[in-house]
Image (spheres, rainbow, N blue to C red):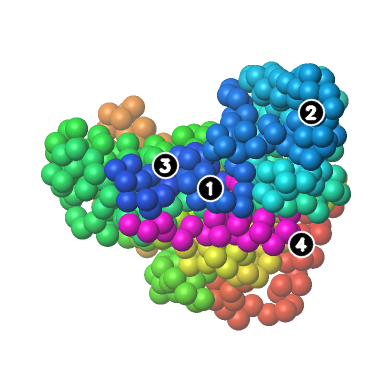
């Protein structure tokens, strides 16, 4: 079995071999397992072991540092050669000089050699559990390597250090708030990675961290340091692992799937191979058919654990467009144009849509039905601003990896104007960075046709103009307006269903239409609930007079001007004439909307 062509491995090798950088950060899926392709019984390895198996070449001395372990040379011969080079570097004598000095002063030379050999070994021992010492020792090794000592091992071999858990060794945060030890480590690495002699050498350092933003910015933002992302497993890599698991794990050949292996690999999008291994081992132990529901549940649990349940949840709407009331022309548009374009996977796919309109208009319920019609994964973004500095960046990097691995997903954001920050100078830097990341994801060509963004907001004007531009949700901004005409009649009949099922006379219908003029979808729902409650409280069937009396007793809340302002904003921001109250809206009418908005703003409505 040959090792698969991991893109990150090729990119990292190209950057180091070309000399574009001597310090590299590997980020992303760093806690997964990888196919070493060695044909052995255990060919899937953690990242550190995988890198060592791929980079163990004659031209490099591989050195590993793990935060709770020693500085470790992969080959013992390399350690001995480094010890020899260290001794020569510290004494200042090459091998010829040592031979001469040994003849002239054998006891003195032997004593010096023993002293510096002990110095090297003592430094390695002191580095155990002490990352500050470890970093300084490794930096000194690079200085030793550049000393060009004749015939020394370091003269014809390059050092390559792989440092695990760089985010724990060099934690993020303002330098003034770090401990003395943390500041010392940052200082050592800053001097090391920005040293011109190191940058022009052939030595290299590879830092492992899930996110660059978790590493102290004094280091992460150095221009000398480049980043290579390890992406989530692709469908083919998940399929390869399934084949490997079945042939290597005990009793795995008896594993039975509910469908084909290809379907299994498709539906496990978003899982790491480590998570996939847990799922398969559990199925083998249970000895039962691995059902689709179990796989979906595992995917949901894993993604929520990665992204935090406070930030994201899976939504499974149970209603479809046929279950919704009113919005007849809009539903026709959704079925004929919006849903087909959301389903598309090529350039004709929409990156998303913004859904706006006054509060209580039914935006969320209607577009949950759209998501249900699409029959795909629906991820609801909730509290996406983490209270911890930098944590939002990490969560979004995880989200992006998950979305890249999926074949199709809908990102559903309710109250989008409150979720996303601005980009102006008065906005906090964390919010600007967050909004920038969202905007970049919306227009990312790699995600077009795979990810659909649905933003719900009653305050479309509060959304960043960069989010509302074409190429993002500005391709389609849909207004959800209060029901009128036939739609109002549909809502009225739905409100009375199960309460008053007799045929309404024309006069009765006109009376009820007058009472419900300007009602929102939420108002109809509230009145339906009220009528049902009154029917139970009075223990009798309601007649038309009762219904009119109950409806007439209700006074709408004093938010008419706010709702009117939100309606006007929805009309002005709408990107389809066919979705306006009538398709022949004139420029004069649009100008009148602007004028009315200005008047409301002058009254303090916004």
SS type, badge 4 = helix
Judge from the rendering whether residue 48 lies leftward or rightward of residue 251; answer left or right. Answer: right
CA–CA distance in space, label 1 to label 4: 72 Å
Residue 39 visible in the shown view: yes
Q: Which residues are magenta?
A: 1-27
Q: Which mark is residue 102?
A: 2
Quadrant showing the N terminus:
bottom left
Q: Nearer the viewer, residue 417 or 202?
A: 202
Separation (CA) of disc 3 from disc 1? 15 Å
**Tag 2 secondary structure:** helix
Q: CA distance from mark 3 to mark 4?
A: 66 Å
Q: Residue at x 60, y 81 (%)?
A: 584
Q: Secondary structure at mark 3?
A: strand
Q: Residue at x 48, y 46 (%)?
A: 53
- Is-magenta flag for residue 371? no
| Residue to which mark 1 is pinned | 56
Closer to viewer: mark 2 or mark 1: 2
Rendered location of residue 589, percent (x, y):
71, 74
Was residue 22 drawn as part of the magenta stretch in this picture? yes
Q: Residues within 10 Å of mark 4 (few under 14, many from 20)?
A: some
Label 3 sits on residue? 45
Q: Residue furthest front?
A: 103
- Give the mark nearest the N terminus, 3 or 1: 3
- Label 2 – label 1 distance at C-alpha: 36 Å
Label 1 secondary element: loop
Q: CA distance from mark 3 to mark 2?
A: 48 Å
């Amino acid at each position: 079995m040959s090792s698969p062509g991991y893109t990150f491995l090729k990119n990292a090798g190209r950057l180091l071999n070309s000399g574009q950088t001597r310090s590299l950060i590997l980020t992303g899926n760093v806690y997964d397992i990888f196919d070493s392709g060695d044909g052995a019984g255990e060919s899937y390895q953690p990242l550190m072991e995988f890198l060592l198996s791929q980079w163990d070449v004659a031209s490099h001395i591989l050195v590993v540092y793990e935060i709770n372990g020693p500085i470790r040379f992969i080959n013992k011969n390399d350690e001995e050669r480094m010890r020899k080079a260290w001794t020569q570097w510290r004494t200042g004598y090459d091998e010829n000089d040592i031979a001469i000095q040994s003849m002239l002063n054998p006891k003195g030379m032997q004593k010096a050699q023993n002293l510096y050999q002990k110095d090297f070994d003592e430094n390695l021992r002191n580095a155990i559990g002490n990352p500050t010492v470890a970093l300084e020792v490794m930096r000194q090794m690079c200085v030793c390597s550049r000393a060009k000592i004749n015939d020394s091992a370091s003269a014809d071999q390059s050092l390559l250090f792989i440092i695990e858990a760089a985010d724990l060794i060099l934690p993020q945060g303002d330098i003034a708030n770090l401990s003395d030890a943390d500041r010392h480590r940052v200082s050592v690495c800053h001097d090391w990675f920005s040293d011109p002699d190191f940058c022009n050498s052939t030595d290299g350092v590879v830092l492992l961290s899930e996110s660059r933003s978790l590493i102290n910015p004094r280091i992460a933002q150095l221009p000398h340091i480049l980043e290579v992302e390890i992406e989530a497993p692709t469908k083919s890599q998940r399929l390869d692992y399934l084949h490997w698991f079945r042939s290597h794990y005990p009793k795995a050949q008896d594993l039975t799937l509910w469908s084909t292996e290809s379907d299994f690999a498709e539906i496990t999008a978003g899982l790491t191979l480590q998570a996939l291994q847990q799922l398969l081992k559990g199925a083998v132990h249970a000895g039962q058919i691995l059902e689709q529901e179990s796989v979906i549940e595992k995917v949901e649990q894993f993604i929520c654990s990665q992204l935090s349940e406070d930030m994201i949840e899976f939504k499974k709407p149970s209603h479809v467009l046929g279950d919704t009331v009113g919005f007849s022309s809009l539903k026709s548009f959704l079925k004929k144009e919006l849903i087909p374009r959301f389903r598309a996977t090529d350039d004709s796919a929409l990156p998303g849509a913004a859904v706006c309109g006054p509060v209580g208009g039914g935006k969320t319920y209607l577009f949950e039905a759209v998501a249900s019609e699409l029959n795909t994964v629906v991820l609801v973004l909730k509290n996406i601003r983490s209270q911890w500095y930098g944590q939002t960046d990490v969560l979004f990097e995880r989200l992006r990896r998950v979305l890249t691995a999926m074949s199709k997903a809908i990102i559903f954001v309710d109250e989008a104007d409150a979720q996303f920050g601005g980009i102006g100078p008065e906005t906090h830097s964390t919010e600007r960075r967050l909004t920038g990341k969202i905007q970049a994801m919306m227009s990312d060509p790699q995600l077009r046709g795979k990810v659909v963004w649905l933003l719900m907001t009653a305050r479309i004007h509060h959304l960043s103009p960069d989010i509302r531009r074409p190429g993002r949700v500005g391709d389609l901004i849909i207004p959800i307006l209060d029901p009128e005409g036939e739609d109002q009649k549909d809502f009225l009949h739905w409100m009375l269903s199960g309460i008053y099922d007799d045929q309404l006379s024309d006069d009765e219908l006109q009376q009820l239409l007058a009472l419900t003029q300007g009602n929102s979808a939420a108002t109809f729902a509230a009145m339906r609930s009220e009528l049902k409650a009154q029917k139970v409280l009075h223990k009798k069937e309601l007649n038309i007079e009762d219904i009119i009396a109950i409806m007439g007793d209700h006074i709408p809340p004093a938010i008419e001007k706010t709702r009117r302002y939100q309606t006007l904003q929805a009309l002005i921001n709408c990107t389809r004439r066919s979705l306006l109250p009538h398709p022949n809206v004139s420029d004069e009418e649009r100008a009148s909307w602007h004028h009315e908005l200005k008047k409301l703003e002058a009254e303090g409505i916004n």
